Structure formats: C-alpha cells, structure tokens
Image (tube, grey):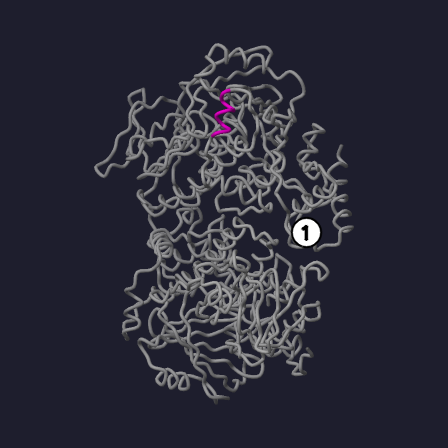
Amino acid sequence: MQSDVRKIVIAGTGAAAGAAAVATAVSLQGSGISITLLLSPNSQKPRPVEVFRSGPLGFHTKLGIEESGLCRQTNAVYGMGARYRGLSESGDDVFVPLGTHGKTLRLVDFHHYVAKLRAEDGAQHFNGWSAAATAARAGRFDPAQADLEPALRLLEYDLYVDSDRYLDAMLVQASALGVRVVRQTPLNAELNAEGMLESVTLDDGSSLHGDFFIDCSEDRFLIRHVTSDDELCDWSSWFSCDRLASRSVKSQQTPRLFTSIEAHDSGLLSQLSTRALATGCFVYDGASINDEQAVEQLAKYLPGAVPDDAQTAPFRAGRYSRHWEMNCVAIGSAAAVLVPIEVSPLQLAQSAVLRLLAMLPRGKDSPMLAAEFNRMTNVEIDSARDYQLLRLAVTNRQSGQFWQQTQRTQWPDSLQRRIDLFRSHGRFTARDHEFFSKSNWISSFLNFGVWPASYDPLADMIDEQRIRDELIRFRYWTLADD
Amino acid sequence: MTAAALSTVLRKEICEIELVESDAIGIVGVGEATIPAIHDFNRKIGLDEQDFMRRTNATFKLGIEFVDWAKKGDAYMHPFGHYGFNINGVSFHHYWLDQNRRGNTAQLGEYCIPFVAGKAGRFALPLSDPNSVLSTYSYAFHFDASLYAQYLRHVAEQRGVTRTEGRIVDVALDGEGGFINSVRLENGQSIAGDLFIDCSGFRALLIGKALGVDYESWQHWLPCDRAVAVQSRNSDTLDPYTRATALKAGWQWRIPLQHRTGNGHVYSSQYMDDDEARTLLLENIEHEALAEPRVIRFTAGKRQRMWKKNCIAIGLSGGFLEPLESTSIYLIQAAIMKLIERFPDREFNAVDRDDYNAQIGNAFEQVRDFIILHYKATSRDDSEFWRYCRDMAVPDELDYKMRAFRESGRVVFSKRELFIEPNWISVLLGQHVIPKTTDLRVDCTPADKIKTQMARMQEVIRRAAASMPTHEETIARYCPADSTKIES
C-alpha cells in the first residue's frame, strides 16, 4: 500500500531530537522513507546533563541499541532514585529508589506485610527491601552482576549522561542509519492549502520539505504553526515557582548514584552528576527571592569550578493539550514543562517517540491516531505531574513562604483520590500509559511517611512466622551487596 | 465460586465463611463455556485440573466459532491464541492485510494454531517451551455448570466453609447505618455476619431487595432478553470449540460436553415469541433433545453499585451479559479476585468500596462493548432485529475503537482489559470491519520476503496442528468423565 508519508523531518536542538531521529530511523529502516534531522543552535544554554531510563526496560534496549558503549562515551553514571532533604519537619532524608521492594506473597502486595510488621514491631525502613536503595547506599551498581534472587532483580534504573556526548553518540548512530543531518536555524514554516506543514525555511534561504514533522524544539517552533490551541494548561496553582536558575561545574568527587533534591524556603534545589559534570538547578518563587540571591544560593548548594556562568530564566509548569495536530507532533519540552524533579524532558520525549512510532500514519492527516496519541500522552504527563506533586502534598515543612502555601494547596482530584485510597488500606490502582509504575508510587508513599491507616486484612492470613522469614530473606538479599 | 476462593485465602480462626444455599432453587447455568482467564482462578484456588474436568464432564475449548454474524454464510473464529508472529515489532494482522490486498487469499485463521487445530477436531495441552509453536495458544473448558457448582462447594467445605441449607426469607438491617445485620431463613434460623456476599442470582435478595440498589439496563444495546435451552445427544466427534450461530432475532449456542451437548437460543422477546424461539432451537440442534427446553428471562445490564454498605453482589445479582463470549464465569471470577484485593475490614471504608465499584463496573462495560460489536458490525438486513442492531448507536468507547481500527488498523485498547489486541482483531476482522490502511512499518520489509515468511508460518502451524491427537483421544487419556457422586 502506498504511503503519502515519504519524508519525515525531526526538528530540535539537542538530545531529544537526536534520540527521536535514531528511534525513527531504526523503526523505519528499509521502508524507503527519508528522515532529516534539523538541528538548530539552542537560544538558551542546553542542559549539560541528561537523564533517562536505562536497563532492560529502557529506551535504548527497546530499540536494540547496546548501552554499555553508550555509557563509556557519555561519562555515564547509574541513577538509582532521588534523595530528598529538608522536606519534612523532622529533618530526615527521604530516599525514593527506582524498581521494586520485595515481592507479592499469596496475592497480597509486599508492602502490606511491611505495614503489618510496622503495626506490631514499630518503625520499618521500607527501603530495607529495595535493591536500588542498597546500590545507592553502596555507591556501586553493576547491571551485569549475577542475581541471587531473580524475582527481586533490579530492572529499573536511570542513566545520567553528558548531553553533548549523548547527542554526538546519537548523531553517529543516526548518520549510520541514513539520517540526513541539517545544521541550520529555521526561520519560518510554510503551510499548504489544507493548513498542513509543508516546509521549513532555513537561514541560508533554502527550504526543507517534509510530509510529517516531529517537533522536539524547546520553543514549539513547528507545532505552533499548525495548532489551533497553543495555550499552556497552567499548573501554577499547584506549583507556584516561576523562575529557574541553573549552573554546572566539573564533577569533583565520585559521583553519587542518585539525584539530590533539597527544599529551600522559596523552592527546590537539585543536583546530579556524571563522571565529568555536576549540574544543579534551583526552581524558585520569584516573589520571595530575587535572581541574584537565587544564583548565590545555587552556588552555595553546588560549589566548584564553574565552566559556565549560572543562568536564570522564567519557568512555568504545565502542558499543552494537543501534541499531534495535522502532520506535526510535538514531544518532550515542546509538549510539557514538568517540575524538574525525577522526570526529565528527554525521558518524556523518548517515551513519546516510542508511542508515536507505533502509530505513524500513512496519510499525512490521521485524526483518529492523533486523538489517541494525544489522549495517551496527556494521561502520561498528568500522571507524572501527580507523582511529582505527591512529594509536595505529603510534606509537612512549614518553613518558608513557598512551603506554607503548599500546605494550603488543593491538589488535583486525581492525586487526592490516590492519596486517600492509599491512606485507607494501602491500596493503589494503576492506570494505562502511566510513566511511573505502581511500585514507584508505593515506594513514594511509604518513603515519604504516608503509611496506610490499616493494611490488607488478607496479610493476616499467612502464618506470622512465615512472613517474618520471607521478609528477613528478602532483606538479607538486598543488604548482601553492602 | 466465591466460597471456594475465599476459603483458600481466609484463615478459619480469623474469618469464618458461611455459605447459605437452597437445593430447592435451581441454578441458571446449562452447560457453561469459559475463557482462558479461568486458569488464573483455578490456579489461585489450587484446583486440580484433571480431577475437576473428570467430575464436571468437561471438554477442552480453543475458541468460539461465529456463524452467520456479519452476513449469512459467513464464519470466523475467535481463537485463544495469536495470529502469526509479530515482524519487526509490528502486529501480524497488518502484514496479513497487506498481503491480502496483494492477492494472497489465505485466511487469517490459517496462521493461528487454535483455529487450525480446532477446525480439525484436534487438541493437545500447550507446551511451555517458548520456542515451540505449540506454546502460542491457550485453552479453556466447557463443563456442566451444576456439577462445577457442586465441585466448588465440596472444595469450600473441605476448607472449612460451613454450609447451611435454607431459603432466605428476610434480611435484617441495623437501624442507623443501614448495614445488613443478619439474614433469616424459612425455618426461622437467623444468620449474622460482618460481610454479606449476595450470590442469590437475578433475585438479588440482599443488594437489590434489602439495600435497594437499582439495576442499570443495557437492553437498548443488547436487546436479547430470553434464552431457551436444551441438552441434546452428542455427535460422534467433539469439537474443541463453542459455536455461536446468528439467527433471525438472536443466536444459538452449542457447547459440547463429554456426555451431551448444551444448546441454547438467545433471543429478543420484542422480535420473537417463545414458541417460535423454541421451534427454531429444536430445528437447529444436530441430535435428539434430551429434555424439554427451558426458558430463562434476563435483562442485560448491571447493578449501579456492586458493593454497598457491607454487601457485595457477585454473579447474576450484580449483573448479566449474554454468554456470547463466554464471559459469565469470568465476570464472577474478576469480582472475586478484586474482592480479595480490596478485602474490607469492619469499617467498610468508602474509598476502597468506590474503587472496587469503579473497577468492576469497568470490567462489565468492557465485556459489554466487546459483545455489542458482534451485533453492530453486521450487514445483515434480513430481519427487524438485525436492522435495529446495525443502525443502533453504540457506547462512545466502542465507537472510538471501531473508528480507530477502520482508520488505521490499530486496536486502541487498555492493557488492563480482558480482551486485548488478538481478541479484538478476531472479531473486528471477522465482522468485516476492514482498516483503510496498515502500519507504515510494514513497508520496511519487501512484500515477497513477507510472503515467504508467511507461507513458512502457515506450514509450521499446519504441521503442528496435524501432530496433535484428536480432542477425544486427549480427553480419554487426560480427563475421562467420572460420574461418581461428589461427596458433600
């Protein structure tokens, strides 16, 4: 069957566009469809470090791209989760590991047994059953290591990579797969009579024609020409920070295998590093702290030799509602701006491009596929937003205007229902197309101290000693690496 | 089913289960066909498959054959297995459609082992070796529902469930909260409890009569409201599949058991009277009827809430969908499993209850939509009934699925649905909902290469099916009927 789509143009400035080009090329190899990557210089400083899911369930493995070479080329560090500091009044750190904790016993999820133990013996440290938390503590992780307990194997972890090097690696792969790379700045876009994108005018005066476009830009350069709805669904009523400062330094010590996040009176600071670079950002409320003070805060938080000066920029969290319009699809930063904790724009872009490749149309216009793609994408983004907001919703920090306001926030219904359901009996109902799994959510609840009022009554139905034996056995395994 | 399942997870010292049943009240089941999801249930309650099959005259089932649905003279199967193999991550049916347009006339079913084996009357248990084509299908059972009920009652009693014989005549609520305190039996005995599970069938004694939860009718989408059922003598051979033949105002099932065949005609009383329905049933059975046909009345739909206060409706008291896709037992099983996941304590927390209601409501709606598709996607116009079905408006989600498939060949579905891509593909294509386009990635492989690969698949499947013993041979070796009475 003939396809009207003969030429796909992917436009962007960095890692997301590179990853999208490779994925598209792998997926359409042999089809005769040509792929052009239009790479333009970023008007803002690009993120020096990128984060994405690695491992057997990650983006590259799904595309059949071997990751160990990529790790070497990009100064990669494994990410096991996020450590939060200063979110609770008690001052304790909270670590939210990736992956799972223990395993289901007799139809009852593992955390119910831990909750039962807690009801009987007092405080329990849920991360005692997390392989990722153990690796983060030990500062060591080797995905190739043989597993003592296959059922508890860690299948979910991140990679932190140098953005430039990652983009280079993607460009090498893309070129090898026949992708044409054009390095130009787009000036304008031409539409045809039906309002579809036809070509992009470049700064050398030439024009780049395409049948289907993927917009990975930071400023929605392509999609804004075709969309009838260019309004950001604003999330500021839940997350009021409106400025973002960022800075990066040379990596000094041995990098940590996690992202550090710290509460500040006026917002959130975070940092993570590869083997070469450490990067930090501060998202803050511009009304309670000015840019100069923010940059100073960030320098204190992330000291060290500075290759670049710190930058500040406006920040507005939210998402657009129509990502696929006509023959153009916006992904990553062009689709949503998320709070910069635990999800990166690259991660969103990778997930979106995999979804898109399974739905590419033959005709330029495919309203049903577009509607379905938009529906799934919005579920994914909103659920990721809820996952991030959960951290704010359950904190009891009082110090600082930002946090006092957080205490009074009315959270999205979708999040509040999940919190209520979990608080009651530790239950959680997963939905489709979610970025974070049930395990991630449960791990977040319990590590942030949201223990259910009562556990699953069926957890009482197994012999008490057996539960203890199993719990000890699982814990022994996760500690064995220490 | 509920008593047997709960008795495997609840410890007697902590939570007692009492089953109140009356032998005087018959059960609706006439010969039951199931879907592969039943394995989950059987495994969870620790049922011995061979034993249970022997005791319930069970046979194997590889799918459901639909005759005369999209148009008269048509037949297709909804088999319990995949079609072909994915190529480069793209579902097989896209390649099949492409080849079909290029003039390759092989039927989709020829790439599906349960279809080929089923039509040849062959059955073998699937292998677990993932490299073998004999691991790419699943199976379910046909069994005698009354014997199955007896069998599970026996399992439940062995695990400590108390059974009380008697008919419930009254339900006592506590004054303030409206919770059920106890039920009173005909002989005056009163039985108290914390949690009441209403398995009282269409009468819905607790959830409907006592607690007043209304029934939501789906009759405008599923106009059939009666069934007339009869058992008949077996053929010489036992087909390892259920057959559903569309008739003038409904359809007729045929379920082969070891000792007899179950038949039933599901129809809409608005378009056909009972006499005509009975006559049609008897005309269409292949061998002599073994009893007088019985008429059963129903309304497609579900209770507005399955769980209210301390009462949960499971089975017909909660809702009914015609057995076109053999989902009756599945819906019971889904409710039980969800109950186990959301098992309440004495506080009967509203958040857990609402979540349960939402999820079970969802399960019913998904099955409902799948069944409606068989009626909607038809070009039959030989009766009022079919014209109505063809022209009716369907639920939004089904409409969306059908439009998406027509436009793109994609099955938009949620991972958490019972029926997933291969199920929808069987029925959508079987009912002639034909996509306008195929997946773009089909173009990545030259068509003649695909043609060769597909021919090889077809050959592998044909050989594998031919290597299987006949259905009768497998039954004789694995689970011949044992008519000894189940001791209770």
Report which quarter residue A391 is drawn in: top right
**Is residue A407 one of those drawn in magenta?**
yes
Residue located at (31% from left, 76% from top): B271
Residue A28 visible, this angle? no
- On the image, the x and y values in percent for residue A16 come to 46, 30
- On the image, the x and y values in percent for residue A148 come to 74, 43
Task: Please determine whether, in this image, residue B402 is positioned above or below residue B292.
Answer: above
Q: Quadrant of the N terminus of chain B?
A: bottom right
**Highlighted magenta segment, given as a residue range:** A401-408
Say which chain tag 1 marks. A
Q: Quadrant of the C terminus of chain B?
A: bottom right
- On the image, the x and y values in percent for residue B393 come to 30, 60
In the image, is A232 to the left or to the right of B466? left
Task: Please determine whether, in this image, residue A10 is positioned above or below residue A365.
Answer: above
Residue located at (53% from left, 42% from top): A420
Residue located at (41% from left, 45% from top): A359
In the image, is B31 to the left or to the right of B448? right
Residue at the spot of label 1: A459
